[in-house]
């Protein structure tokens, strides 16, 4: 026995007419005495319909008490449930002619502009328009775009050379800095978000680096690893490298976090002075990008060194089955890491590989394959014909007299 699917469409008795928002959201409209009411509340049952109708009727009676309202007033209603699971209603009025949103009661404007600072001087808007070339052909429509017609700066050869060893992190930070620092001006909001994310990354990097440091100390304390021989094994050397890199990560994270602790909350002038002062040095932004990426790079290389140390311990001087199992897992994980590094960290835009669906289409549709082959043959023959005509056109004319038939055959060739 099949049950009927639950319908979420409005009930049939609803006088609300469904409308489609340009962004795709569905809402409903109702006209009461030349006043249009809108709501995005979906009428799942008659109770919700009655609630929204009662709200519209009560608000309409209040509107009649205010004769000085604009003639093109429209009302937007919203129904929701509070923490006590009780229905609450809210509204606002809008006038397109006056381009304003208002209420019948006095409302504190800080509820609307809670996270924004008021513009107390019109000169702020004037300078904003001046900096962004407002009204001109070169107007900046996006904050990371330059108003000058210039090609984007390419990273230096040295940075492109060391970026693969740094997991391409300096290039990523450099792109973000170039979006923040445009035309020798700093976008304060972007800079604040950038520094906040950096501090979060540095703080989150200290804990795993500490765990890695503890793991290295534990590995070096194993008697089978530390034999007391002056000639250290590969596992010990790799563990030493991982230990130093972990310590370097912790030190750099602490220094950078302390140095940039107040940079996220500095004023726009101080942020501009900070970035501009470093950008004036040769390779200034590139050096900043490298310094910001050092903690993550040290942690990743320290993790790789510890990975090598553990692999050497499991493969050196162990039984055959231990080597086979450990070697298989080691090889599989290494291949996966290599694929991720190649296809995710480094850009592969220079590899022009034909999309797989097109190849599958050629296999699935042999007629299309024959058409492509025939088109290539015709194209090749056309090229040969053009080449032959070009060669014949450069043949010097003979001095001896030729017949008309020979001349005609030569011209047709």
Image (cartoon, rainbow, N blue to C red):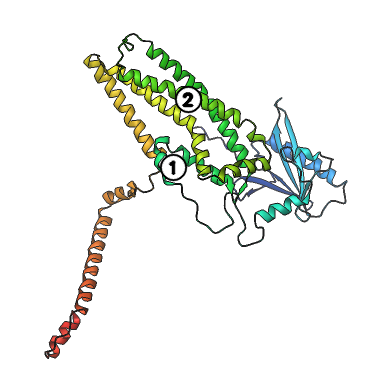
Q: Considering the numbered disc 2 on the image, is that residue within a helix, a strand or a loop?
A: helix
Tell me which residue sits at (28%, 56%) in the image: 368
Question: Is residue 36 rendered to the left or right of residue 370?
Answer: right
Name the outermost residue toward the top.
223
Q: Position of residue 391 (x, y in %)?
A: 20, 75
Q: Residues within 10 Å of mark 2 (few under 14, many from 20)?
A: some
Q: Is residue 378 above or below residue 355?
A: below
Which is nearer the eye, 411 or 215? 215
* Residue 13 visible here: no
Q: Position of residue 175 (x, y in %)?
A: 51, 44
Which is nearer the eye, 373 or 79? 373
Q: Is residue 300 above or below residue 22?
A: above
- Image quarter (top left, top right, bottom left or bottom right) of the C terminus: bottom left
Residue 206: which disc? Answer: none
Question: Is residue 150 rendered to the left or right of residue 126?
Answer: left
Whether pointer 2 and pointer 1 mark residues with C-beta atoms closer than 8 Å, the reply is no
Which is nearer the eye, 326 or 161? 161
Judging by the rendered image, the residue that carries numbered circle 2 is 248
Residue 159: which disc? Answer: 1
Question: Is residue 70 rendered to the left or right of residue 235?
Answer: right
Q: Position of residue 270 (x, y in %)?
A: 66, 40
Question: Is residue 91 rendered to the left or right of residue 106?
Answer: left
Q: How many marks?
A: 2
Q: Position of residue 207 (x, y in %)?
A: 51, 21
Tell me which residue sits at (24%, 58%) in the image: 370
Q: Earlier in the sequence, mark 2 or mark 1?
A: 1
């Amino acid at each position: 026995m099949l049950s009927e699917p639950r319908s979420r469409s409005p009930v049939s008795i609803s006088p609300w007419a469904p409308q489609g928002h340009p962004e795709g959201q569905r809402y409903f409209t109702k006209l009461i005495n030349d006043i249009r009411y809108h709501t995005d509340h979906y009428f799942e049952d008659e109770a919700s319909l009655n609630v929204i109708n009662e709200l519209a009727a009560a608000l309409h009676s209040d509107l009649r008490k205010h004769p000085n309202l604009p003639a093109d007033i429209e009302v937007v209603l919203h129904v929701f449930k509070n923490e006590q699971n009780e229905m609450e209603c809210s509204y606002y009025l809008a006038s397109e002619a006056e381009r304003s949103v208002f209420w019948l009661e006095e409302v504190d404007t800080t509820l609307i502009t809670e996270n924004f600072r008021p513009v107390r001087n019109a000169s702020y808007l004037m300078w904003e328009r001046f900096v962004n070339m407002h009204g001109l052909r070169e107007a900046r429509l996006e904050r990371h775009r330059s108003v000058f017609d210039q090609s984007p700066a390419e990273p230096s050869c040295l940075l492109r050379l060391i970026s693969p060893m740094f997991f391409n992190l300096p290039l990523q930070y450099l792109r973000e800095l170039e979006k923040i620092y445009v035309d020798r001006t700093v976008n304060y909001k972007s800079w604040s978000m950038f520094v906040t994310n950096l501090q979060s990354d540095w703080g989150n990097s200290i804990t795993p680096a500490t765990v890695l440091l503890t793991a290295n100390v534990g590995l070096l304390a194993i008697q089978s690893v530390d034999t007391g021989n002056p000639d250290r094994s590969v596992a010990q050397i790799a563990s030493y490298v991982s230990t130093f890199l972990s310590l370097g990560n912790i030190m750099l994270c602490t220094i950078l976090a302390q140095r940039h602790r107040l940079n996220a909350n500095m004023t726009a002038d101080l942020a501009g002075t900070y970035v501009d002062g470093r950008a004036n040095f040769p390779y200034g932004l590139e050096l900043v990008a490298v310094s910001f990426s050092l903690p993550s790079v040290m942690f990743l290389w320290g993790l790789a060194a510890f990975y090598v140390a553990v692999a050497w311990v499991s493969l050196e001087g162990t039984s055959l089955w231990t080597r086979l199992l450990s070697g298989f897992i080691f090889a599989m994980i290494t291949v996966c890491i290599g694929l991720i590094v190649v296809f995710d960290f480094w850009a592969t835009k220079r590899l022009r590989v034909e999309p797989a669906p097109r190849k599958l289409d050629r296999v699935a549709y042999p007629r299309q394959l024959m058409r492509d082959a025939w088109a290539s043959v015709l194209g090749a023959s056309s090229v040969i014909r053009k080449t032959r005509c070009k060669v014949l056109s450069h043949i010097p004319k003979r001095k001896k007299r030729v017949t008309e038939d020979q001349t005609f055959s030569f011209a047709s060739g």
